[in-house]
Every structure is written in structure tokens, then in C-alpha cells.
Amino acid sequence: MNFEAISTEIFILVLGLFAIVMDLVLPKNESRKSIGGVLVFALTGWVLYMFSMYVPETAVADGSATTRYFMDMMYIVDNYSLFFKQLFMVATVFTLMFSMDYMQTVLRYKGEFYALLMTALLGMCVLASANDFLTAFIGLELMTISFYILVGARISSVNSSEAAVKYLVVGSVSTAVMLYGISLVYGSTGTVQFYEMFHNQHLFTAAGLAGATMIMIGFFFKLSVIPFHMWAPDVYQGAPTPITAMLAMGSKAAGIAVLMRVLYVAFPLIGFYWLPILAVLSAVCMIGGNVMAIRQNDVKRMLAYSSIAQAGYMMVGMVSADYPGMKAVMFYGMLYVFANVGAFTALTVVEQQRGGSDYKSLAGLAKSAPVLAAVMTISLLSMAGIPPTAGFAGKLYLFTAVVNQGYLWLAFVGFIMSMISVYYYLQVAKAMYLAEGDGKELHISGAVRAAAVLSVIATILFGVWPEKLAELTNLAAYTFLQ
Amino acid sequence: MTSFPLLSAVLLAPICAAVILCFVSPKAAQSVRVIAASAMTVALALTLYAFFSYDMTAGGMQFTESIPWIKDLGVHYALGVDGISLPMLLLTDLIGLAAVYSSWNITNRPKEFYILLMILIAGVTGTFIATDLFIFLLCYEVVVIPIYIMVIIWGSTKRVSKEYAGMKLTIYLLMGSAFMLVGVVALYLTVGDVVGFRTFDMQALAVAGQNGLLSEEFQIFAFLLLLLGFGSLLSMFPFHSWSPDGYAGAPTAVSMIHAGVLKKIGGYGLIRLGLLVLPLGARFWAPVIAALAIINVMYAAYIALAQKDLKYVIGYSSVSHMGYVLLGFACLNVVSVSGAVANMVAHGVMSALFFSMIGFVYEKTHMRSVTELRGLAHQMPRVATGFMLAGMASLGLPGLIGFIPEFTIFVGSFSVYPVFAILAISGIIFTALYTLRVLAKVLFGPRDSKFDRYKDARGVEMMPLVILGIALVGFGIFPQVLMGMVGSGTEQLMPLLDRIAEVPGFIGGIR
């Protein structure tokens, strides 16, 4: 039992338990922000520490470093999973930073919020490291069940409860579909391990293929890929804004992390079945998500559709099914975190202090909170892929990878749709800069300001000089395919 | 290596100004303006130094800088200028400085305005001096978003609302660039496959393209994608309709920069990427471009005749002038391409001056209709001088900046497309008609007492007229300063142009 391999997960679990204990120890009417503060510092420290866990490229190439496993082969800790764990933790740290004020004023049960956020994070980390379908399933359930509760955390709000119920029902259905698929695959191949499925000819049976399809559909539900996206807009709109942010960055990236491992490690043998499907679905996502986002008047809803489109972009990288494609997906996933942090920071403050998240509530934000308005604009432009933001570099990585595999038409769809997306992102900018608001100054705490400024610095830095992030993703993708 | 990074300094001057402005109090309007003006003065001074110390006999890229930037994409932070980009850089800084002065009287949120203006100028500067395609693209698209925000906040609503104008402009340019990006990605990968390593270095791409490493089919396909992108930026027919609407809605400084330099990125890109990297593609599509160019010249000039709004007249006039540039490019010989480059500079200066003067008149009178304004020369003699200078240059009066470049284009094109050349020359008649009609109505005629209360330009307000006027007359009297520089750049194209002259184009071997 190599407990060192799962030190990250143990650490997160301890943090979650710590949040529960603190909540019990603290007097009832005292602010729970201190818990959030501790979590932010602890997680930040751990993210930095994790850089030392990476196995260097040379050590992998000459075979001097062996991949770390836990519990036989159920759990794998490689550079790929380390990268995604860092991504989830960065997303959580930023979410904690900009949500502490919001949680303190809006939620009734504050301590539980922190504990559940940690279990959701734990679920994501398990997903990134899962090396067989059962572990993946446990991680997925740990994550989604935490999110069911978090989505409904605003018990005074009808929308929030509706979103939670909707998410629960749709999520359970997709879980059931996926579990059925896993049982079919297990029945035909006799294993649930990804590595053992790699060469298993029994996957070519009718039951095996049906099972693989159902597993993929289950993941598509989680990624809100069209046509399995119906839950996303309602859930995004109803959930407390920081949770919407976590759904968009964390939950989606976790789904992508495990989906890539499933596709490339477990199912490469049937690649010629799923590659065209993936290509078409990614195009459908890019077109559908961007077109439907245009007519929304609630910014959270708009971001829900935009996140569908973003899932499409990331699937473009998966279609290329090689090392540049994987690297591009990881790169894009990371910069999407920073873009979302920027957008949702502003949105959280607005929802908390103006009571809404539609375009009207954003009116005049450029006057009442110029920093947040600028951060929001730049973050949205990063999602659209306009230089000098990181989104441009990310899209360039994605589309060069896929064009290199001969899918020129996907690049056409991708670039044209991302230019169309500028239209609705600029509607937000228009509302903030042109419309006259009430002119009242918004109260912005230091943590919120720090989250906003740090995210935008990262967005511009990775846009103008993506070298360091590119190196890290290169390492993760390169060692994954060794 | 230890030499002073001149071009980086030119690029960083506006960027530094933008960063500094972020920390200036919004109420300190005068500090904001002075900082912006100083930054542009520094940039212009450095550019002038580069312009006059450029070694024309040596030619080629000079003042080069190169730092490895993103290794796995093969990107270098590489800057350099040659005889084609240096005039464009000079144009950018001239108009940038003039635009700063033209916006001197903006009272609504001056801080944000100047920050966006500085980002805009930095973006345009970067496109002209980048010798790495990635850096070029980075700067190319940076400019679009500040323009949108500037149009919707500081623009003016007349025939179309400023929100509509801003969005139309943005969408047209972004859609064009979407096609261009696909073309660039395809080009980048194909060259990477051929030469064995991925690179965005324009020189390396050009070497690959000119040495026959790229198949003719690929060049034809990729050039079409680039043409859609650069053509819509250059307001090539039928992608021109954003231009008049956009200029009409935009604030003065944006109109000046957009018509003056931003549009020229289209022509510059066509030469730098289209011709140098994809010569066979350029050859193939040249007859189509030439035909579209004539439509630009004639059709836009014809529409300009009927316009009542001064900004629309100049907007369509700029579309018409871009036709000459396209024609010069499409003829694919050294003389005509030199004319095209020089004409971009000439048109940049004159249209910026025009928009600056219109902006001044509009700021004072809130009128820009040809039917409302009249006899302004009585009250505003200095502004009238500006109008006259720009108008005369526009119709190609010898002694001003417009004459030599246009003449060069006609000389170069006559041997290639004689019919098109004659049509283009006759387009000057239309140009003279609409320019003289507007000038006569707005400036001359009986004194109208309702304009008596408006003061003429004075002090700082004179600066755009002085800066652009000097360039307009200076380059007119000493055309060799401009043409020599352009020639030193286009001479390098001679072997390439001679080689592709024998290749059949879109309509076969006939030229």
C-alpha cells in the first residue's frame, strides 16, 4: 500500500474534515470566512508542493522512474493526473477567494459549503487518477453528489432548489446509463481495468460496443455535450454563482480528464468508431452552444451555453488523438479556469450586491467597479479566443493539432464560431460600459480583488508568453503516452 | 546584440503609456492627455530616426531583434523593418500622434479613451514591425476589441446607431480574420511538414513558399483564405460595407487610425504574407483581385457622389482609393507594387487629415451634413486649409502626396491590364467630382452667420493639421524620400515577380 501516492487525496480529505470540525467548534454567529482562508492557504501551498511530484521527461524515457500506483492498478499517479489535480485545486482556491463574502451573506449553512467543496474536489482528484471503471465511477459519484447539494445550497431560492432537483434527476439517469455500460463492458471483456482493456478483442462484441457507447454517453452528460446538455442552462442559472463557476471549470475538466484516459487507454482499439462521432459532436457543440448563447438575457445562462461551446473546443483536441491534441486540451482547460474565475468573480459580486445576474444588473459596472468590468471583459475575450489573451494561444494549439490530423473543416467551424461568440461576449461589455447603472459603488473585498486581478494577469501572461504552461502540459501529455 | 532595441521601444511606448494611464486619477484629464502625447512623440521620434538611418542600399530587414518566445510552437519575438514596413510604421506614428491631439477635447471618460487608444496604436505598430507570424496575429486582432468599445462609448449616432456601427465593424473584421486564421494554421503546418520543423518566422515561410516547396494547389487555396481576411480589412468589394458605416459611427481618433493605418494592414498583409509566401496563389487570384479593384474604384466613387454626410463621403472615398492599392498589388510588377505601398501611405495621411477636420467641425457645430454646412472658409480658414490640402491630395494634385503614388500605379498597371488601367484613371474624374462638390459646398459660398459663433482651430487643435499637413506637402514636394524607401523594399521582389509572371492565372495564361 503506497500511501505516499495518494497524499494529495488524503490532504484534501483532511481539509474537508477540518472544515466540518471548525464549523462545530466555532460559535454559531461567528463568520465562517476563517475556514475559507485556511483552505485557500493550505491548498495554495499544496499546489506549489505538487510541482515537485512531477516525474521529469528524461526519467520516463530511460525507464528509471516507474509510475506510481495505489491498490494494485486501480489508482494511478502520473504527470497527467498531477496536472489535472493542480488545475482543480487552482480552480477551488480561486472559487474560495471570490465566494467567501457571497457565502457569508447568502447561505444559511456556511460551514457545510466548505466541507462539500472539499469532497467535490476530492472526487475530481479521484477521477483524474482513476485507472479502472469502478474507481472512476466512485470519483464521479463523490463529485456529483457533492454538487447536487451545493447547487441547492440557497434554500431560500426557488431557482436553486429547482436546479438541484433537475441536476439530481438528470445526473442520476446519466449515472445509471454509464453504470449499465460498465457492466456490459465488464461482461464482454471480463475486466474493468483500463490497461487490460487496451488489447481486449472482446470489446468488438455487440455488448462490448453498446457498453462503450453508454459509458461515453454518461460522460457526455457530465460534459453537457449537445444533445445531452438540457440540464446545463437551468442548473447553471439556479446554482449559487460560485458553484456555477466550479461546475464550469472543475466538473467539466474532471470529466475531460477521465474521458481522455478512457478513450486513449481503454478504448483506442475501437477508435475508428468513436473518432468520427467525437468530431461531429464537437462541431455540433461549437455551433449549437455559440448560437444558443446569443439569445440569452441572463449572463449565467449565457455562460452555460458558452461552456457547452467550450466543451466542443476541448473535444476538438481529443479528436486529434495524439500528443499535441492532449496537450492542447490540457492547456485550454487551464486557461479556461482563469477565464471563468475572471467572469464569475464579477458575476458573484454583482449577484450578491445587486440581486441578479442578467444584463440589466451588469449595467454601468464600468463606473461602479472599473476593475471588475475590465477583468470580466478580458476574461470573456479569452473565452472567445481574442489575442493577447490566453484563449488565442489555446485555440491555436487546439486547431493546429486537429488540422495536422486532417480535420481542416473542424478548424473552419471552430474559428468562425469563436468569432461569432465575440458578439454575445461583447453584449456583456456593452452592458457594462455603455448602459447607465445606479452608479452606486460596489463593495469589493481584498480577496475578491486579488482573485480578479490574479486571474486576469494569468490570462494575459499565458496569452503573450505561454512558454511555461506549454512546457508543463507538454510534460504531462508526453509522459501519458509513453 | 547590445544595440538599442529601437523597434521594441517604438512598440512599448504606447503600451507603457497605457499601463501608466491605468494608475492616473480619472479626474486628471490634462495629465492623461500629456502622457499619451509624450508617448506618441517618443514613438514618432524613434521612427523618424529609423526612417532616416535605414540603409537603403543594403535593403532587407534592419533593426532586427529576435528572442525565442514559445519553443514548442516555434515562435520568436522577432521584429524588423524593411522598405515596405518602415513607411507604414512612420504612417502609424504620424497618425497616432495626430489622433491623440484630435481627441484633446474629449471630456467623457478621457482616461479610458486614451488607454484604449494607446492599446490600439500599439496593436497596429506591432503588426507592421513583427517578422514573426504569431506576433503579427497577436497584434492584428488586438485592435478589434478596443475599437468596438471606443465606438459604442464615444461614437456618434447619425444615419446608423453607433452600437450597430461598432458591431458591424467588429463582426466583419472578425469573420474575415477567422478565414485568415484557418489559412495561417494550414500554412504553418504545411511548411512545418516540408521543412521539418514548425516555425512562424515569416522569412522561413517565404523561403519555403518561393522555392517551390508548397504545391500550387495549396498556395491557391491558402491565398484565397488570406484574401478573405485581408480583403475584408482592406474593404475590398464585396466586403466593404462595414467601412462607411463604421467610420461614420466611430469617434474622430478611431476613424483616423482605422482609415489611415488599420485598413493598410490588409494591403500590407497581402504583400508580406500573400505575395511573399504564396506567390503562385497571388498570381492565380491576381485577375480576380484586379477586377474587384476596379469595382472598388468605380462603384465606391459613384456612391460617394450621392452622400450627404461628410463622413460617408470620406468613407466611400477610402473604399475607392483602396481599389487603386488593390490594382497596384494585382498587377504584380515592381512599379505597380511600389505604387500600391506608397499609395497606402498617401491615402493614410490624407484620410486621417480629412477625418480630423471633419471631427473638429462636428465637435464644434454638431453638423456634418453637406447640406447644412456652408461657407466655413469664412469662419474657419485654418480648418478650410486642412480640408483643401486633403481634398487636393485625394484627387491627385501634383505637388501633394497623392500624385506620385497614383501615377506609379497607373504606369505599372497599364502594361498588364490596359483596360482596367484606363477605367481606374477615369475613376479620378469621379473622385474630382465628389471631392470638389463637397469642398465647394462646405467651405465656400456666401458667409453663413449661424457659424459666426464657432472659433477656428487654435493652439493644440492645430496640431493634427500641422503634423499631417507637413507630411502631405513634404512627401509631395520630395516624393523621392517616400518612393526611394518603398523602392528599396519592392526591388527585392523583382526576381520573384519575374519568375511568377509566366505562370497562368485565374483566367489562364492571358494577362
Image (cartoon, coloured by chain):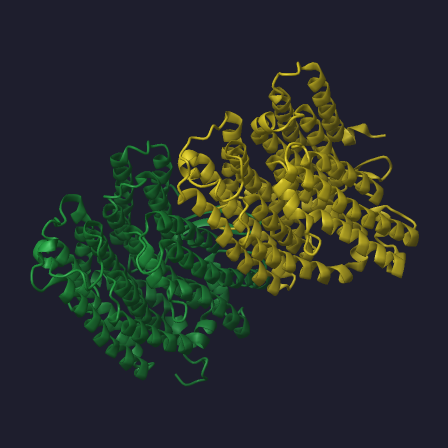
Chain colours: A yellow, B green
Vertical position of residue A148 compared to residue B441: above or below? above
Quadrant, the N terminus of chain A: top right
Vertical position of residue B183 compared to residue B17: above or below? below
Q: Nearer the viewer, residue A179 or A335?
A: A179
Going by the image, does A292 lie left or right of A260? Answer: left
When asked about the image quadrant of residue B459, the answer is top left
Going by the image, does A402 lie left or right of B376? Answer: right
Going by the image, does A104 lie left or right of A213? Answer: left
Residue A205 in sight from this viewpoint: no
Vertical position of residue A223 compared to residue A412: above or below? above
Q: Nearer the viewer, residue B46 or A196?
A: A196
When asked about the image quadrant of residue B358, the answer is bottom left
Image coordinates for residue A135, horizontal then vertical, percent: 82, 40
The residue at 50%/26% (across/down) is A445
Image coordinates for residue A394, horizontal then vertical, percent: 57, 49
Image coordinates for residue A155, horizontal then vertical, percent: 67, 32
The residue at 26%/71% (across/down) is B306
Residue B475 in sight from this viewpoint: yes
Image coordinates for residue B355, horizontal then vertical, percent: 25, 57
Q: Nearer the viewer, residue B488 or A463?
A: A463
